[in-house]
Amino acid sequence: MENNKPLDEQPVKENTSKWKQWVKRFGIGGIIFFTVKGIITSTLIYFLGKNFWTIISNYFTALFD
């Protein structure tokens, strides 16, 4: 059978923000944890990547000397 409800009576979606969804899913502690984890990971990638070729070249230089 057809549904003869007018279009005006469609259920209204709640317009919740992403922050509220994240807090509901992970909690405040989870958001702090993932933020700190991201900062530490980004810092390690930056500093290790910055010195990567220097470390590798020194290793092979010392290996073949």
Image: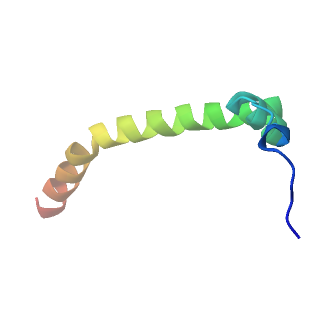
What x and y, as percent, mark residue 6? 82, 45
What x and y, as percent, mark residue 45? 41, 41
Image quarter for residue 12?
Answer: top right
Q: Residue furthest bottom?
A: 1
Identify the residue at image location x=17%, y=55%: 62
Foreground pick, 10 / 31: 10
Q: Is residue 45 above or below residue 23?
A: below
Foreground pick, 21 / 2: 2
Give the left or right position of residue 52, taking residue 62 as reference: right
Give the left or right position of residue 53, taking residue 9 as reference: left
Foreground pick, 30 / 61: 30
Identify the residue at image location x=82%, y=43%: 10
What x and y, as percent, mark residue 61? 13, 54
Image quarter for residue 3?
Answer: bottom right
Instruction: Give the total number of marks visible in the rendering.
Output: 0
Identify the residue at image location x=19%, y=49%: 58
Identify the residue at image location x=89%, y=70%: 1
Q: Which colour scheme appears in the figure?
A: rainbow
* Placement of the C terminus among the 4 image quadrants: bottom left
What x and y, as percent, mark residue 51? 27, 39
Foreground pick, 37 / 15: 15
Give the left or right position of residue 50, taking residue 62 as reference: right
